[in-house]
């Protein structure tokens, strides 16, 4: 199918199989509680990305900040998938202000030969997973290269928290969980997204969560319902030595959150491609007291938007987390 993009250049829309392929890869994106709050629609020659607010996580994320960050991750995943398939695209973010749920329009503007880096990054989409076990330390040079490479491409800043901030981070993590100890609505919501049902195509399965003895070895982590087992995987790593990276940004508008999600995706995929493991951390930013503690660690005018533990997680890989069938999230108008 062909259409017209601004400037009069004909847009060639990939065939159905190719579109399904790149959307499927985009939907491997991580999302808050694996809620997958995205809708993809082919509208003439345009592929449009919409927010699905029915999949919001209103207690943990009352202002949908993390929902939009998740969509930014999916949008960047789509760019990576398209590049690896030899498709050149142009993105328009928030193209129709009267429809704030319409987050982006993708136009296909021709072909290009994928570079080895394009192919490697797309492979990272299928290799990446959220690693909640304790990790060994990331080598300093690899971490430095990662932060430099992603920062150079990003509108948002990435701050590497030095090891001596770890006690404050751990304290902030405990404070946020303590404040929620009696918040039944929060725990009900978390229980819903972590329900043990092998047929579910959303949420976080028990195989991706940790046992009590594993959770004890990672101080900066959301307290998910514990998996009842005597597992103590990755026993050689007695305590977590991951480095925490913080993506900061103005964080006031949907555009800010979308940009933050795109940077997050870039960071996760680049880390995976360079053999590092990652775990997104957001619970500390959901409570004002702990969010302020994190912001005070940053020499940044902008607040923290999302944190990522980065380390080396040899020796264990959980089964792949589920995703909704592509037919549920992608359709033609
Ligand atoms: C905005 C955002 C916030 C997240 N917050 C957390 C978190 O606080 N703790 C955590 O363990 N995982 C967090 N995750 C990871 C998701 O739970 C995970 O991506 C999802 O369950 C899918 O699993 P996968 O990443 O292994 O594919 C977050 C992901 C996103 C995009």
Image: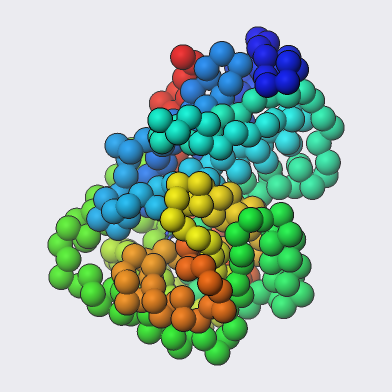
User: How many badges with numbers are in the image?
Assistant: 0
Farthest top residue in view: 1
In the rendered image, which quarter is residue 197 located in?
Answer: top left
**149 or 236: nearer the viewer:** 149
Residue 30 visible, this angle: no
Residue at left 31%, top 69%?
A: 287
**Left/right of residue 222 with respect to residue 145 in the rendered view:** left
Please tell me in which quarter of the rendered image ligand 1 is found.
Answer: bottom left
Residue 75, percent across and down? 56, 40
**Left/right of residue 180 with respect to residue 288 in the rendered view:** left
* Residue 262 sits above or below residue 54 on the image: below
Residue 192 visible, this angle: yes
In the rendered image, which quarter is residue 136 located in?
Answer: bottom right
* Residue 313 sits above or below residue 240 on the image: above
**46 or 120: nearer the viewer:** 46
**Left/right of residue 181 with respect to residue 16 in the rendered view:** left
Residue at left 73%, top 16%?
A: 8
Quadrant containing the N terminus is: top right
Residue at left 61%, top 29%?
A: 106
In the rendered image, which quarter is residue 315 located in?
Answer: bottom right
Residue at left 65%, top 38%?
A: 79
* Residue 226 sits above or below residue 97 on the image: below
Residue 142, percent across and down? 74, 70
Residue 293, percent across and down? 41, 80
Residue 145, percent across and down? 76, 67
* Residue 239 sits above or below residue 124 on the image: below
């Amino acid at each position: 199918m062909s259409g017209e993009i601004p400037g009069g250049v004909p847009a060639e829309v990939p065939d159905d199989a190719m579109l399904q392929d790149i959307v499927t890869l985009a939907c491997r994106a991580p999302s808050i509680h694996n809620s997958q709050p995205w809708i993809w629609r082919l509208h003439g020659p345009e592929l449009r990305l919409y927010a699905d607010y029915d999949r919001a996580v209103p207690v943990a994320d009352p202002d949908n900040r993390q929902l939009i960050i998740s969509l930014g991750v999916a949008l960047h995943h789509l760019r990576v998938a398209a590049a690896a398939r030899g498709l050149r695209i142009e993105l328009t973010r928030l193209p129709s202000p009267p429809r704030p749920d319409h987050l982006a329009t993708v136009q296909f503007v021709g072909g290009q030969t994928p570079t080895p880096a394009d192919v490697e990054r797309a492979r990272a989409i299928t290799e990446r997973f959220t690693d909640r076990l304790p990790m060994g330390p990331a080598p300093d040079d690899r971490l430095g290269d990662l932060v430099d490479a992603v920062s150079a491409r990003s509108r948002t800043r990435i701050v590497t928290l030095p090891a001596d901030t770890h006690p404050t981070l751990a304290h902030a993590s405990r404070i946020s969980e303590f404040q929620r100890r009696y918040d039944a609505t929060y725990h009900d919501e978390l229980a819903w997204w972590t329900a043990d049902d092998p047929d579910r195509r959303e949420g976080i399965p028990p195989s991706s969560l940790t046992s009590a003895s594993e959770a004890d070895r990672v101080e900066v982590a959301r307290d998910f319902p514990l998996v009842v087992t005597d597992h103590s995987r990755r026993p050689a790593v007695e305590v977590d030595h991951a480095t925490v990276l913080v993506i900061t940004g103005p964080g006031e508008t949907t555009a800010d959150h979308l940009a933050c999600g795109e940077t997050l995706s870039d960071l996760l995929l680049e880390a995976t491609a360079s053999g590092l493991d990652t775990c997104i951390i957001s619970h500390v930013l959901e409570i004002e007291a702990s969010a302020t503690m994190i912001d005070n660690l940053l020499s940044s005018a902008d607040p923290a938007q999302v944190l990522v533990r980065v380390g080396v997680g040899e020796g264990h890989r959980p089964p792949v987390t589920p995703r909704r069938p592509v037919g549920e999230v992608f359709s033609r108008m």
